Amino acid sequence: MYPEYMQESLKKVVRTRPERLKLAKSGKELYPLMTDDERKEILDKFHPDYQPDAKREIRIGPNKGEKITTEVADLLESYSRINPKDFDLSNPDYETDVLVIGAGSAGFAAALLAEENGAKVILDTKLRIGDSNSMMAQGGIQAAVSPDDSPALHYLDALGGGHFDNKPELVRALVSDAPYAINWLSETGVMFDRNPDGTMKLKSGGGTSRLRMHSARDYTGAAICRTLRDEVLNRPDSIKILEHQPAVELIKDSNGRVAGAVLYHLENKEYFTVKAKSVIISTGGFGRLHIKGFETTNHYGATADGLVMAYRVGANLLYMDSVQYHPTGAIYPEQIVGFLCTEKLRALGSQPVNKDGDLFVHPLEPRDVESSAFIRECLERGNGIRTELGRDGVWLDTPLINKISGPGTTESDLPAMVRQFGRYDIDITKEPILVYPTLHYQNGGIEINDHCETKIPGLFVAGESSGGVHGRNRLMGNSQLDIIVFGRRAGKYAAKYMKGINIGKLTLDHVYEYEKEVEKLGVDRKKIAPMVLPDYVPESVKKRQYSTHYEGTLR
Ligand SMILES: Cc1cc2nc3c(=O)[nH]c(=O)nc-3n(C[C@H](O)[C@H](O)[C@H](O)COP(=O)(O)OP(=O)(O)OC[C@H]3O[C@@H](n4cnc5c(N)ncnc54)[C@H](O)[C@@H]3O)c2cc1C
């Protein structure tokens, strides 16, 4: 139920709906797609990445001198959580062949394939196993499987969406492994939506030229992640799980290889060490950095810890100047601000309209362009709807879905959306929802090759913490695919790599070396990373706390 002050605008949406519906049903273009020049112009003017203070030069480490997202540069220029002197590395608490850090779907796929390739695995995670962005994914996973589609077309779409900055070898791996990834998931137990004849139900996504998005209603991520989690839990003899133990630093050996990690146990507040022949980082993204003050769709643990740890051992980053804002984050009611409203809503027929009920952009422009159009409509043109807490947004006219895609589509294909808004007395089959761009995805990350190797021997990366697959803008459905394709590859190649390895003497010397550089910059000693958990305690409260060593959520 919407408040009184929104009613006038809602009436206008209802008034313009029949005309917009007629247009959608006519098969004519709903709203002209922007030309390349128009896209460039709107991105330059309105996308948060293109604002003057969005980036700054990083002053240390492998990417020194490059301009990267300001909040990421701040995070990387910081001290370690540990003092290496406190650790006796000659006597590690755990030993294994492959250590996987992070238990989302990339971590699960990696652990399973490492195990299948003969490795003993430790899967370590910060929160509970499965607490991750993977679990929250809604819309779907892409793969070219229909007769009018091909991996080559998928390749071109991914490249175009990424502004042609993607690493070609990674896109090739992504699209050519895609059909096999879907088969593997189906065989492992994921129940994708199917047509009555048993073929996959395929939908479109922003920026894609064919229908190739597979989904399980609007909880695709949970369907995949839970299935893989169960499979991991089924192999207790070879995959050991450590929960509530964020990794806070990687360990190297005397030959310069990555050979383990230091973990911090959130419950008993103790540190533990793991010695491993190879390490896979699958710690996901950075939504909880709240870049440029944006709300986020990401889970509580998305604090870029993997980037920090990898950077300190010398692994370089790619495209850390680029952030994905999803156009449709909820901005009303306040309890769910930032919450993702899946792109599938637009794929099934809902249209973005302004306070007067007018369409102002094609519903399925690439995400960065669509987001910029929403920002322009609210901030420059003043055509947004303002909530009582001063947030601006536009309507997403969801009642159109059942009229365009068939009666009952919303209830059958978007049950999580129906439930989420239903909790606040908003029936999305009858009323539109209020949305604004929300921080969604880390486009860049740690550079890998198509075997998921970084430039540092022994260190592999898969999933959202890697960079290069999606260039500077990821298309919908390609991340759920990325985590399966590269999770599997990371597991396989990390297991192959470890077979010939004798680990040298363990060391944390790189932490000293890195800190020397941080010190030269005159950085405040209290600035430490990885962040591990986001800090939402207001300054006024911190001032009243007894501890004089406030270090985020860990003290
Ligand atoms: C709400 C939402 C909806 C989405 N919908 C889609 C979609 O429909 N289609 C699509 O393609 N993509 C979608 N995405 C993006 C996609 O789901 C993610 O990019 C992807 O799941 C990331 O997987 P991952 O395994 O790399 O990271 P995650 O799934 O985030 O897993 C990272 C894991 O690492 C753990 N971790 C973090 N730091 C540490 C540490 N220091 N030590 C140990 N463990 C650590 C975390 O707790 C977590 O378990 C969506 C994302 C969100 C947030």
Image (tube, rainbow, N blue to C red):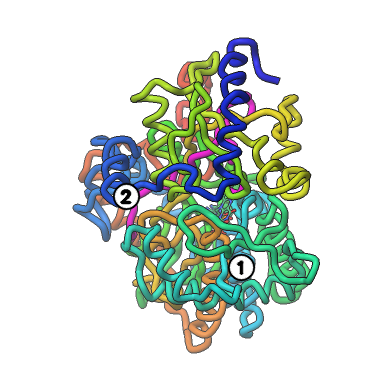
Circle on res. 455: none
Q: Position of residue 85 (x, y in %)?
A: 42, 55
Task: Give the residue displayed 22% in from the left and 49% down from the top.
Answer: 59
- Asked if disc 1 is less than 8 Å from ligand 1, the answer is no
Circle on res. 35: 2
Asked if residue 331 lies in the magenta stretch, the reply is yes
User: Is residue 253 at least partly visible in the picture?
Assistant: no
User: Is residue 457 at least partly visible in the picture?
Assistant: yes
Q: Amino acid at mark 1?
A: Tyr
Camera-side mark, 2 or 1: 2
Of the 4 image quadrants, the one containing the N terminus is: top right
Q: Which residues are magenta?
A: 317-344
Q: Amino acid at mark 2?
A: Thr
**Label 1 crowd (10 A; few <14 / some 14-19 / many >=20):** few
Tag 1 or tag 2, which sits nearer the N-term?
Answer: 2
Spot the residue most to the bottom.
500
Asked if residue 26 lies in the magenta stretch, the reply is no
Q: Position of residue 30 (x, y in %)?
A: 49, 43
Q: For ligand 1, which image quadrant applies?
A: bottom right
- Quarter where residue 120 is shown: bottom right
Is 244 placed above or below 252 here?
Answer: above
Task: Give the residue displayed 49% in from the left and 75% down from the top.
Answer: 151
Tell me the element at label 2.
loop
Spot the residue most to the top.
4
Task: Give the residue displayed 69% in from the left and 62% down from the top.
Answer: 224
Label 2 to label 1, Cα distance in Å? 56 Å
Tell me the element at label 1.
strand
Does residue 480 appear to the left or right of 217 in the view shown? left
Task: List the residue tagged with mark 1.
Answer: 94
